[in-house]
Amino acid sequence: MKFYHSIFIAATLATHVQAIELEAITAVAAKFDNPALDEQYKARLELNQLIDQASAPGKEDPAALTKSLVLALQASGTSREADKYILRVMTRVATVDAVDCLAKLLNGQDAMLKEEARQVLQSIHDPKAVVALEAALRKTSEKREKIGLAYSLAIQKSPSSVPLLASLVVDSDLEIARAGLSALATIGGNEALDILKEADASQKVALGLKPDVEEALLIAGSGNAGVVQEVYQSTKSDFVRLAAFLELARNGADSKVIALIEKAVKSDSGGLRHAALKRGIELNLTNVLTGLEQGMDQMPAEDRLIVLANLQHLKSVDVAEKIALRRMNSGVQDERIAALAALGEMPGKPAFDALLQALGDRSPPIYQAAAAALAATRYPAAEAELLGQLRDTSTAVRVLAIKAVVFRQVPGANGILIEIIAGSDPVASKEAMKSLYFTATLDDLRALYSRASATQDAEMRKSITAICSKIATRIDTAEARDLVKPLP
Amino acid sequence: MITSVNSFSRRTILKGGLATIITASAPVFLSSRVLGRAGNVAPNSRINIGIVGNGLISAGHRGFCLTQSATQVVALCDVNRDTLDKAMAEAKAKGTTCEAILDYRELCARPDIDAVVVSTPDHWHAAISIEAMRSGKDVYVEKPMSLTIEEGKAMRRAAERYGRVLQVGSQQRSDNTFRKAAELVRNGYIGNVHTIVCRLGDFPQATQFAEEPIPDGLDYDRWLGPAPWEPYNSKRIKGDYGGGWRMFWEYGSRKNGDWGAHHFDIVQWALGMDESGPDLFVPKGFEGGSNQFHSYAKGPKVIRDGDDKGAMIRFIGENGEVRVSRGDKFETDPAGLKNVVLKSGDVRLYDSKDHRMDWLNSIKTRQQPICHVGIGHRTATICHLSGIAERLGRPVRWDPVAEQIVGDPVASRMMDRPRRAPYALPV
């Protein structure tokens, strides 16, 4: 048979290692002819395994392996299905030795194999592969092929492809033009940049493509402040302007950037204004801070959320605290939540007091936000203050402190909670039971249970025993369960 | 088509042209009254949502977005007309009138959409997410975030370039029990962690299905998108937690990208490795090993499907264990450890009560959500490297700083996959 004959000749010409691989490859390739689909799938797996073993570090001879795969592809007896999977494994291992064979497939009539061959060529980082891809792009008139080839050339990142890709930018089909722009943006470099600038100024480029040209310019010119600045000033696209702004603002804090941010804060584009606000606060720009102090109330509600979420960047803690405290009076729930989160980041007593106050709010989202902020508060005296408040004479103050210690574990608090439970204030006692349920350790449970045993008040003994049982269930150890026995 | 960026398209509109009256010496902020707005609260504070991919996994997202007062679903998109019709009927039944769109690019081009949920099969996550971000939308994308490591890098670049919020749907981060488990591990309550076992399970082996006629109303070419061409069969595209498209490497990362994307994510969080990752990935069967594992340079070995003691994730430290699963299943050794309340100096992890709500909050505040693009990319990288090692049948070494595979050119080529024309990845 011609097929096996050609394999035999090829194999005898190749190295010993290559011959073994070729033999194995062709043996697996033959399995793709099996009409049973399961067997065909197994052949795929077998081919993968064969190639992966042959290409393992230390064992590999990529050129020899590629030559074997090429020979298998060229053998007249291999099925189209086998060719397809040989090409797919080649995307992982093929070297420049495959380019001639792949170029033939790329220029052939079989659309499926053309597409597979393109993908292999794209993976071979060699000028010869680039030449093959460029030649195919020059020749084809198919939209799908043009887009695919432009993408492959983008992956290759060869400056030699720039003039050819430039010709796509003026294509009347917008998808082809976009593929060209995208490839030029990826390749970058001065030549690509010049072409993109020209396209930006050209009347030949479709109007609907303008933002894409600007975006490509921005990507190709990334790191070049002059280009980015130019795009920022000239674009009419909000998204391109925002991207340009972010790059300029991220990479500098000189007077030009400061002026840019201060101007952008007044923008009528929400995205740009918010980005500018965030960056202005991060950089503590004087004019922005003055605006915050003087104009917060007049700002749109969504802008105030941006401010509150970034208050931790302000160098002046007093100003930050003042702003956050003021927003606690807002009628907008989101704003109060954001203010509470900000207050949790602050070290001042007023911030701490506000958090404690909010813990008593009736709205679940508000007291949950207060609790989360309290758990992490940076107020250095938080724990000492909470311990003091647990002993306060006012029930209201004590109740808030009792609630707070659930979220902010305070050493020594549980002992006081046990005292409160056994004390004479029923409101505080009930609240302390709730808190202790979450925070009690085994030792606390032991202490609480001995209070229950010691008390003469039957009602109190009953309630303490009940909470002890619940705590034991939560702790869920044999020791805890054994500790709590029904009391008379 | 690219249009405009509107963080809050219908909420933030300031009257055009007024900005021109501002002088350099004017206060930095405009009064909303000056701008012609009566109050501080915008008339419509809802976030306009588009959902791309309305199959199996999208039901929860769609249900959430259709019922929240903070959101307004304005468009649903799917390549399958039948799937789309069912989703539209659900929206209608819940009192929402929205547009049905077959091509995600049309949805991304709508200027009134603020945010996009991407709940397609994995092979479409990157392209749609990037297109949405470059069109000014914030994104919630199902896990794993990407199909390849290079896609993840591209998504991270896009989020940074366009200033977008991207939340990855690894929602175990917003589960109290997983957070508590991660906090115990992070704060050393079980001592130095040397072993972690993650339960991933397995999918059936993929196979070749017989070709069937493509049903009317299904754009099968677009369903395949960048994935290699294969003949249509309903089983290939089926959304099925036990198989379907999830069995195929072409559309997902099999179990590493399925449960792995959840559990490896919690491991990263617990170890404080969100900006880094493991450096060695070893497949099951290598040198007779009975389990796949990966390991961190200075830390533990993470074993897939080992002795999990009945837990989805089992952290084993020198001084104890933490075992955590969904459904608030949480055990520790010693048992009392699970009741530990963090001390004031302990690291407290990001506390999110609701993963989707956390995303909405981030959209409003422009802060990073709990599972942002950088975190999602690092977790997906672990899934993909585990998959590469599995497919190659050999260990893969990884440099988590340079984000490159070390010493294996073939494995390196697998950091990305070829894309079928014309489905290129946006820059």
Image (tube, rainbow, N blue to C red):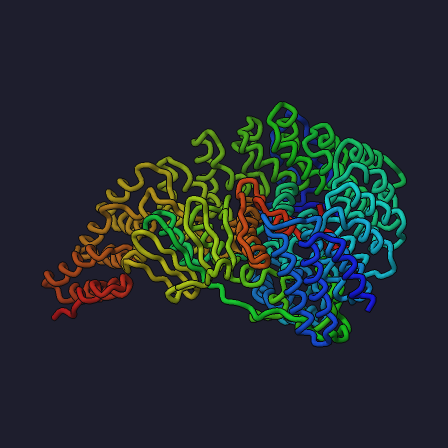
- The answer to whether residue B319 of the structure is visible from this angle is yes
Q: Please name the residue shown 44% across and 58% down the image.
A: B303
Along the viewing direction, whichever of B244 and B69 lies nearer the viewer: B244
Q: Position of residue B272 (x, y in %)?
A: 44, 46
Residue B347 versus residue A260 in the image, above or below:
below
Q: Please name the residue shown 35% across and 44% down the image.
A: B346
- The answer to whether residue B120 of the structure is visible from this angle is no
Along the viewing direction, whichever of A229 and B71 lies nearer the viewer: A229
Q: Position of residue A443 (x, y in %)?
A: 19, 55
Total numbered labels: 0
Report whether A236 appears left or right of B13.
Answer: right
Q: Please name the residue shown 56% across and 34% down the image.
A: A295
Q: Position of residue B24 (x, y in %)?
A: 66, 26
Report whether A261 appears left or right of B109.
Answer: left
Residue A184, by quadrant, is top right
Report whether B202 appears left or right of B181.
Answer: right
Q: Position of residue B363 (x, y in %)?
A: 58, 49
